[in-house]
Amino acid sequence: MTTSQSNAAGHPADRGDCHPQTLLLLGASGDLADRLLLPGLGRLVATGDRPNLTLLGSGVDDWDDERWRRRVADAFAAAGATGPRVKEVVRTTCYLPADVTKEEDLRRLLSNCHDQLVIFFALPPAITAKAAAALTRIGVPPGTRLMLEKPFGTDAVSARSLNEVLARLVPEEQVYRIDHFLGKSTVMNILGLRFANRIFEPMLTSTHVACVDIVFDETLGLAGRAGYYDGAGALIDMVQSHLLQVLALIAMDAPPTLAARDLRGRKAQVLRATRVWADDPATWSRRGRYAAGEVNGKRLLGYADESGVDPNRGTETFAEVVLCVDTWRWAGVPFRLRTGKGLAARRKEAVVTFKQPPRVPSGLIGYDQPDRLRIGFGPDRLGLDVNINGPGNPLELGQAHLVADFGPGGLPPYGEVLRGAFDGDPTLSVRGDTAEDCWRIIAPVLECWRAGAVPLREYPAGSWGPEDSLLIPVPGVATGG
Ligand code: BG6
């Protein structure tokens, strides 16, 4: 499914195909641009949707146009993006080396941008903050849109001060705080599943739901990203951003429309009501770090031995936290968010576990599993575990697993979020107050971990995580996997 083509003000979206646009990519020589942004852009351009787009790359590396064009061409080709529009973007793109924390360099960059401008900050938070502050001193052309990669700031205070700086540059509707999970087709499918069916939505309340698990287990290790990851860790890298966004989409009330104002308003409401279970992060969070091991037959170096990692920082590669969403609908239902790297198997799904039926009639035997709704984020699928009479003895229950594959979306997530910014539709980006709130939610956990109140447990790469990574059991709640 796709999102509304209306912008925040409810007007028809400001389609980029009507006028020329320039995407100024800051951090163009970095890893994020190469792995995710350029492939997403290539696929978007290949759709023919952006006939008047010019790409301008800028980075600290002293590259020339030719080297940059090679990088863009390779990234587009690897993403399977082909066609005349793609060739045109590669042919016309230029690269300007710059230190974007310096006003004179920014001035030079802006003097090369003549169309409606979209600036993508693919930079570490501290550099983004400095570049944005420098921009306030020189100004940006009217109508400029700003896209900022996560993490947005490094805590609630820095997020607030970055929001204040951005507000001096452009109106909030022109700020796109990127969370590429919001561009994943399955994450967007949560909206269709919940609000275009009668059968699920009335069940998604504390009356019927025992708990909600949002799990993102990866087999991948650090993958050469120490420079960023060692300063972040699993809680900031995944929970503070992606998993809280998924929680918001699962827990929010129905928005009247999918326009940015309605959808983001609903998400903001639910996140404002979210906090650590029992306000006790020492009990309701866990952290771990993978040691050397084998994942899918491949040796993985221990995280602490990876080049660029400072083992004394104690950065976690596994994080789990239990949250409550203190609303009428959800009070008393634990939301368990978990993510880890270097684990035995990929498991990327949100699972809604329902309470037991009020009474299973005696005579029906073998009830031992609650029913569950599963929303898979890779593979993209919907699953329903239901108890039915099994084969053989007709009175004996068995669990059936109904599965529907969604198939991948038309565009990769970065293609979707870029399209939102080009169209002037911030629906798929994170609103400023929400970015601050997500830091507020995890702050007590970070504080507690930094104070050493929760041990950093080692787990061998290729295992299921610390202590077999059973999700933290919540007393009095029938949960399970
Ligand atoms: C990124 C995180 O934002 O999301 C990575 O920085 C993580 O650590 C990735 O692996 C997961 O997203 P995807 O789209 O690769 O499933």
Image: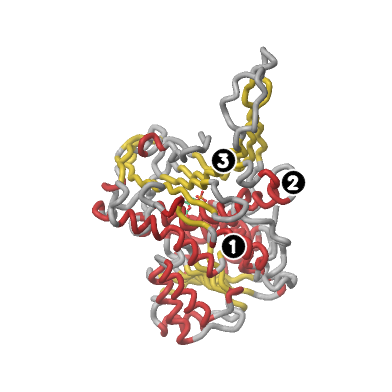
Residue at x 60% of width, y 38% of height: 354
Indicate the amino acid at tag 3: Ala
The picture places residue 257, in percent across and down from the top left corner, at: 72, 62
Query: How far apart are the two marked residues, 1 and 3, measured between alpha carbons?
Result: 22 Å
Please, which colouring scheme is shown?
secondary structure
Residue behind mark 3: 210
- Examine the rendering and report whether any part of residue 74 can be seen: no
Q: Quarter of the image holding residue 100?
A: bottom left
Q: Secondary structure at mark 3?
A: strand
> What amino acid type should be assigned to the residue bearing mark 2?
Asn
On the image, numbered disc 1 is attached to which residue?
269
Q: Position of residue 77 (x, y in %)?
A: 55, 53
Q: Residue placed farthest to the top in the image?
A: 392
Instruction: Give the amino acid type for the residue marked by disc 1 in the picture.
Output: Gln
Mark nearest the camera among 2 and 3 is 3
Going from the N terminus, do you reach mark 2 or mark 3 first?
Answer: 2
What mark, if any, has residue 197 been given in the picture?
2
Q: Residue at x 53, y 79 (%)?
A: 167
Question: Which residue is nearer to you in this view: 226 or 49?
Answer: 226
Q: Earlier in the sequence, mark 2 or mark 1?
A: 2
Task: Tell me which residue sits at (36%, 52%) in the image.
Answer: 224
**C-beta proximity under 8 Å, tags 2 and 1:** no
Look at the numbered disc 1 and give the secondary structure of its residue: helix
Q: Which mark is residue 28?
A: none
**Relative to residue 176, is residue 108 drawn left or right?**
left
Of the pair 151 and 456, the residue shown nearer to us: 456
**x, y percent for residue 130:** 40, 76
